[in-house]
Image (cartoon, grey):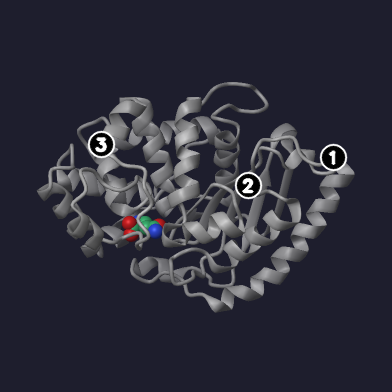
Amino acid sequence: TEQTQEWLQNYVDDWVAFYRKHTSDGEVASYIPILKEANKDHLGISILGKNGMAIRSGDVGIPFTIQSISKVISFIVACMERGVGYMLDRVDVEPTGEAFNSIMHLEMKKPEKPFNPLVNAGAITVTSMLEGRTSDEKLEPIFHLLEHILGYRPALNVDVYESERDSSMRNRAIGYYLLEIGFLESDLNITLETYFKQCSIEVTVDDLARIGMIIANDGEDPDSKEEIIPRQVTRIAKALMLTCGMYDASGKFATYVGIPAKSGVSGGIIAIAPPRVREEELPFINGCGIGVYGPALDDKGNSIAGIRLLRHIAKQWDLSIF
Ligand code: GLN
């Protein structure tokens, strides 16, 4: 009912006001120079569910680049283009326990395929598998899927793209290493260009929440019942988000929050409420998508206030899938 929604809204407003103070414990990302321009105090959340259920609080209108959250989308698109079997033969689904941009574990462990699609080495490999000869051809299906979900075509933030491209030593090192060991299926430069561009797609917390809602509902729009992403692909995406989505803090996130999520260095987090039948008073939290933005990061590169806010909400609403 409307009353319940208002009641939940008031709670979320209080929690956002409280956790906004925690942004001072973090730092905005600086290794991509332009990301330093973000306002450290920002914190916003959008929670979207079926029948237009919406709770929004804090700094919700601010566009930010999707960064690593794009790794979920590129993996989904690659699975839709190539098939799940093809992708799983070439990219593993194991958490690394290492930082997102680690190169060391690839050299030390000499795996037969990259560890998982949600850290840079795996994501760059996935991007090399997208169909198309140019970066724009490879990106088109990503934009197309996003447009299908969001109802508008998101923009590419060219300044962020150029800033990352021109400061991408680590990703180039990873790319050369992947090239050397034979994991890449497209030209290295085109692959990296595509990867930097996919990270520079601009979204809002509403956009993340809407994408999350589709994934939460096994790829189906819960209102129109249209299948947007195959169910099997969303299953794998959710398992990957739960086990690898928060980099080397994924275990803690699974323990203390307990829902599939993926973060990015611009401070975004996409999270997914389980679509199960719950306590009477919270039925419309089922199958919600959640988008969070808080550019102050912790030492793992995850939104510091965003994680704490999600942890609080998950506890209050008993969201853990466990
Ligand atoms: N574009 C960023 C990078 O590859 C994405 C990383 C992230 O969001 N953690 O460095």
Q: Is residue 178 left or right of residue 273?
A: left
- Mark 3: give few (<14), some (14-19) or many (20+) Cα within 10 Å: some
Question: What amino acid is found at the position of numbered circle 2 in the picture?
Answer: Phe
Residue name at image x 81 percent, y 42 percent: 279
Q: Which of the marked residues, 2 or 1, is nearer the chain's N terminus?
A: 1
Which quarter of the rendered picture does the N terminus lie within? top right
Residue under pointer 2? 322
Residue name at image x 49 percent, y 58 percent: 251
Quadrant of the image where one finds ligand 1: bottom left
Q: Quadrant of residue 294?
A: bottom right
Badge 1 marks a residue whose secondary structure is loop
Badge 3 marks a residue whose secondary structure is helix
Residue under pointer 3? 90
- Disc 1 residue lies near ligand 1 with CB under 8 A: no
Q: Are marks 3 and 1 in contact (CB under 8 Å)?
A: no
Residue name at image x 56 percent, y 44 percent: 207
